[in-house]
Structure formats: C-alpha cells, structure tokens
Amino acid sequence: GWFSPGQVFVLDEYCARNGVRGCHRHLCYLRDLLERAENGAMIDPTLLHYSFAFCASHVHGNRPDGIGTVTVEEKERFEEIKERLRVLLENQITHFRYCFPFGRPEGALKATLSLLERVLMKDIVTPVPQEEVKTVIRKCLEQAALVNYSRLSEYAKIEATTLITYLSFFCHISKAFAWWSDLMMEHAETFLSLFAVDMDAALEVQPPDSYVDLMESSIAQSIHRGFERESWEPVNNGSGTSEDLFWKLDALQTFIRDLHWPEEEFGKHLEQRLKLMASDMIESCVK
C-alpha cells in the first residue's frame, strides 16, 4: 500500500495547490486501504498506523499539518474509520493463522497488535489500560481456537499432519504475543481441549493395544529395509540392523513398562505380547 517517492511528490503538490487538508487526505487513504483490506488484500499495518496516528492527532486538537481547525465531517469520518479499523484488526488477530501464516510477513502481526492498542486509545496521550487490551485480545484468541480447530478438523480428513502443522505456528507467532504470553497459553489450552475431545472419541474405537501393533509393524519394516542395505561383511558385534533392532525393542519395552498400567491383567498381557514379539523378531533377524 505504500506510495512510491514519485507518487508522494505528485500528491503533495496536488494537495498544496488545491488546498486539500492533511486530515482529509489521510482519511481518504484509510478509507481506500480499508476497502482493499476488507476484500482480502494484505495492507502493511505500519502504513495504516501512520495515517491513523496523523488523523487522531488532528482530530484531538494537535496541528500535524499546521491546521488547527477540526471540521464536524472530519470527526464523523474519523470515528467511522476508527470503528472499521478496529473490526478489521480484531478479525485479523482472530484469523492470524490465515492472515499471518508462519508469522509472515515478518513483523506484521506484532505491528497489527500495536495498531490495535492505538485504535483502542480514547485520545492521543492517555494509554489504554492493559486490562482492556488484554480483554479484547483474549476474546480474539478464544474465537481463534474455535475457528482454527473447526477448519483443521475439515482438513484433517485429507491431511494427517494438520495438527502438527498448526502447533508449529506457535513457534512463529510467540514473539508477536510476547506481552500476552498468558493469553497465548490459554489459546493453546483451548485448542488442545477441543482436540482432546475428538482424540478421546477416536481412542474409544481403537483396540487397547493398537500402539503395539503400530510399533511392531514399524520395527518389522525397519528390519526388512535394514537387511536390504547390509553389505554382509564380517563384523565383531553384529550388523547395524541387528543393533538397531535390539535398541528399538528395548526402548519399546521400557516405554510400556514405565506407563504403569492401572489394569494389572492388561499390563501382563502387553508384557507377554512384547516378549513374544521380541522373540519372533530376533529369530527372524537370525534367519
């Protein structure tokens, strides 16, 4: 949304020759930029901040362009644009996963949060109470958890790694929310609580030892692929594949044992099954 130096020169000259007031000029900028942003265009929040700060300074009695009078029309248009800008910013924060994917553009989310603080100010000198800002951001992040999870649930039917992809977003947006880390924690907990409901439902229809089935299949495939790559040269302590097999079997047995199953009979069943699985795989490895 930034003008080139040549465009700025032409606009400055036009406004100077025709007596266009600075506040009117920036209100027109904001109106056009908001229309494009509301239609899905990505506008640099720093540019919006600059024009909004100019208009706010003028409307509240300062003289950013040397003009002290404030017209009724300017006040009314400023309040209208201020409300539209607030709605836009809250919507962008709610949909941060789609407006700022993986924290891109760089610094845009942080600038958006900064602009929202400015928009919430009643005048240009009194900072908005942090609790008020916190309340607005908390509301946005609560809605974001619902929006993101509902969309991810739809995508998950096609893409199995959707949850991991979403969780990786926190690595990229945590810096922007550094002042509200507790709110991001609440957002993550809300999202995961929604995920837990679906996860519990999915686990209820799974066999209780399905994890062992998956690990058995994974280790068997690993043995098969490992022996395909073996050089079959004499070694002292066994092949790399056999060493890998023993390590995986030991790690799996340790993991299952450390879970301390509350159901004693089921725990014994798993332990016995792991021993049989290890015996079969070692025999297969020897053959």
Image (tube, rainbow, N blue to C red):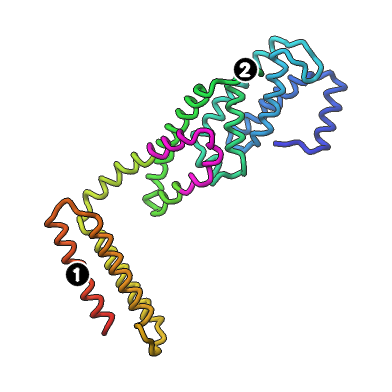
**Other-residue count near label 2 (Cα within 10 Å), few / some / many at <14 / 14–19 / ≥20:** few
Residue 220 % position (x, y): 30, 72
Q: Is residue 262 left or right of residue 152?
A: left
The reply to whether the magenta stretch includes residue 10 is: no
Q: Position of residue 78 (x, y in %)?
A: 65, 18
Residue type, label 1:
Lys
Amino acid carrying label 2: it is Thr
157 on left or right of 29: left
Q: Residue at x 16, y 58 (%)?
A: 267
The quarter of the rendered structure image containing the C terminus is bottom left
Q: How many marks?
A: 2
The mark nearer the N terminus, 2 or 1, is 2
Instruction: Name the residue located 67 percent from the left edge and 13 percent from the top edge.
Output: 75
Residues packed near mark 1 inside 10 Å, few (<14), some (14 to 19) or many (20 plus): few
Residue 29 rendering spot, x and y as whole percentages: 71, 27
Q: Disc 2 on helix, strand or loop?
A: loop
Residue 133 lies, with reference to residue 155, above or below; the image says above
In the picture, the disc for residue 119 is: none
Judge whether 277 appears above or below 168 on screen: below
Measuring from the top left, give residue 146's x and y in whole percent.
40, 36
Residue denoted by label 2: 126
Spatial CA distance of label 2 from label 1 is: 70 Å
Report the residue marked by disc 1: 275
| Magenta span dominant secondary structure | helix
Q: Nearer the viewer, residue 179 or 89?
A: 179
Query: Which residue is depicted at the point 36% across and 42% down?
Result: 192
The residue depicted at 38 percent of the width and 36 percent of the height is 190
Contact between labelled residues 1 and 2, with CB atoms less than 8 Å apart = no
Task: Give the residues drawn in magenta, as a range.
Answer: 168-190
SS under mark 1: helix
As displayed, is residue 27 above or below residue 249?
above
Residue 147, visible in the rendered structure: no
